[in-house]
Image (tube, helix red, strand yellow):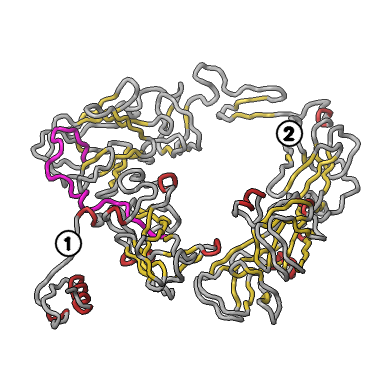
Amino acid sequence: MAYDAKTERLLSLKKLSGKAHTSNDKGLSNEALSSGVTIAASSVFGQAIPASPGTTLYDITDSVVEYVRLSASFIMGSDTTSGQHGFQLTLPDDYESNSTNSKKGTGYFTNGAVVNASGGGIQLVPPSFGNTYEAKLYHTASGVESRIPLLDARDWNLDYFNGIVFQQDPPGTGYHPQNPTYVDAFIYIGDYVGSMLGSSSPGDLGASYLVLTNTGSLNSERALVAGTGLTLIDGGAGSSATLQIDNSVVATISGSVFSGTHIFENGLTGSITQLSDGSAFLRGGDNVEISTGSDGSITIAAPGLSIDGFDREAEFLVLSATGSMANERVFGTGTGIKSVDGGAGNSFSVEIDDNIVATISGSTFTGPVRFNQGLSGSLTRIQSGLSYLVAGSNVTISSASNGQVTISAPAPVGGSDTDLRSGPFLTYEQSSIMSNERVLTAGPGIEISTGEAGALTIQADALGLTRTKRDYILTGTHVALTPFQATGVNFSEVDFSSDAIDIHVNGMLVHSGTYDQVTGSLADYTLSGENQIVFGFDLEQDDIIDAIVLSSGSASQGTGFAPSAAPFLTFGSSTGLSNERILTAGAGVTIDTTQENQAIISVDQTGLRQKVAYTLTGSHPAGNQLIIPSVDFSSGSFREDSIDIFVNGVLMTSGSNEDYTLAGGANNLNINFNLHADDKVTVIIH
């Protein structure tokens, strides 16, 4: 005999509700005896789940959760005549090369690891920790990524513990293309309770531990004390303790404000451990000894402490997190401090970083330094006694009795500018006095304006582009991999660039590639001549082919002559100019100076096309304005031949009685039919 349906239902309900099942006649509230579900500590989350995790693939939040894309594969034997029902999830095949998880490559965190085979070692974080943790299920029918909604007609369920997806009503029989392909979800990568419980035995009682406060339970513990010029910041249990420079006391090379008087008569010398009055700026407190090495390092030790026992709740300073002590801190160095670890059984030294902190023996300040009480001593002599300011050609230097230094450069007598005449000047009009000049000339798609005094404006005339669109209706069939003649277009005008060519079949945008990619089903078509297209599939009678080619127009060439006193804009560096500007090609522009007396600026035809894809997050009724972020229809002059709209990859037709109309705004339009969540609207503006 087998359990009947009522017994099975009551057993499950009462077990999950913490009650024993003693009778089919007793409801949940009538059961007096308690029960529960046995869970091993090795599969219980041991760290708090973040409230706001990162939602970009492979984002890791608080070293606890990681957002990944898991692959879904059919579980043999879980199908019926209705289709396939069960699917198991696995880590990506390239997980170890993309993830920054410190545990990758170990345990269950390996390429292609099966979630349910880990026995709880890999778990998905359920949405009980927040709506952000709701997993997203996708299929890739027709090569398009499509999300499967929570309330989809297939009625699917995800077991977050073992990574099993179940769909009650499959979309079709067998390996149906709309079966689940992958799931975006958060996996738990933190520590489980089992690993955090650790051993109950004490650690090494004789080790020299750095602690924030003395515990009295360790034989050789040291309490870390921040001396003069240092501050110690305690981040709390499980975080870091940071020792850093106190900028109000210690000067840093990046810049400091000195509030007292400082005298540097012969440079800066002396020990970095002494104050200006000769006393030490680091002093040992109770049970602490401080010593300075010959290399300038400072060693802080507390050798006289005597401790009995081992206190696992003490606030230990450790060099790296162990996870075995509740109040440990990882010791870190702040600005101006560096540390040297001598290894187990040796010393751990903390010392000043001379590259950041100024020392009396001499430092080079790379940032501003302010002396509120002024500087006394010679400012015009270096340590050897020589002047540190020396007059060069055409320069005089004089010192006043009040300490001021005057540097003068009187105008030279009989000077000339003949050295500049052969410089590589870039002018906007031709002159007769320079032997190596180039005249700035507008190339295709470029406009140059000199109408404003003292200014020269260069801009790309993107609206001057030419867009060719041809439609072909097939009168018969056309066999795959044979050239299709596209009369009226010339693909060579745009160097056969896929950025400037669009091909549509029955309104559907198809993708280009090489001949090998087409025969290998990795692309839809390739170009075989100036007006020939080779498709990777058969065409039928009445099929419609649309070919669109975006090519550059031509801009007028400038004539006339600029005055000889025009500001110098060069196409190469000249040592004779002090304020020259070198013309440099930016994004979308090329500069050609190979032709004599010319510098031709042209538009790089790539990048002159705006393409934005927008995925709806909810339903949208017909006739209501739909706002597409980051789109500007005015850049295409709201013209039909400059704007293409696709819904789920299908080309739409413009018109009040057709698929859509532009609403008049820069980024909104009216769709004349209902849209649903996850529908994708693609806008292309030329």
Q: Nearer the viewer, residue 165 or 591?
A: 165
Name the mark nearer the viewer: 2 or 1: 1
SS at badge 1: loop
Q: In this view, does 174 lie above or below 500?
A: below
User: x and y percent of residue 642 in the render?
Assistant: 73, 66
User: Residue 573: which numbered mark, if any?
Assistant: 2
Q: Quadrant of residue 88?
A: bottom left
Q: In which quadrant will I find the C terminus?
A: bottom right
Nearest the camera: 154 or 355?
154
Mark 2 residue element: loop
Of the two numbered discs 2 and 1 on the same chain, state the one appearing first in sequence.
1
Residue holding disc 1: 38
Q: Is residue 663 visible?
A: no
Span shown in magenta = 184-211
The kind of residue on which mark 1 rests is Thr
Across and down, in percent, residue 240 comes to 30, 45
Q: Is residue 14 magenta?
A: no
User: Which residue sits at x=41%, y=59%?
Assistant: 72
What amino acid is at disc 2? Ser
Say above or below: 318 vs 343: below
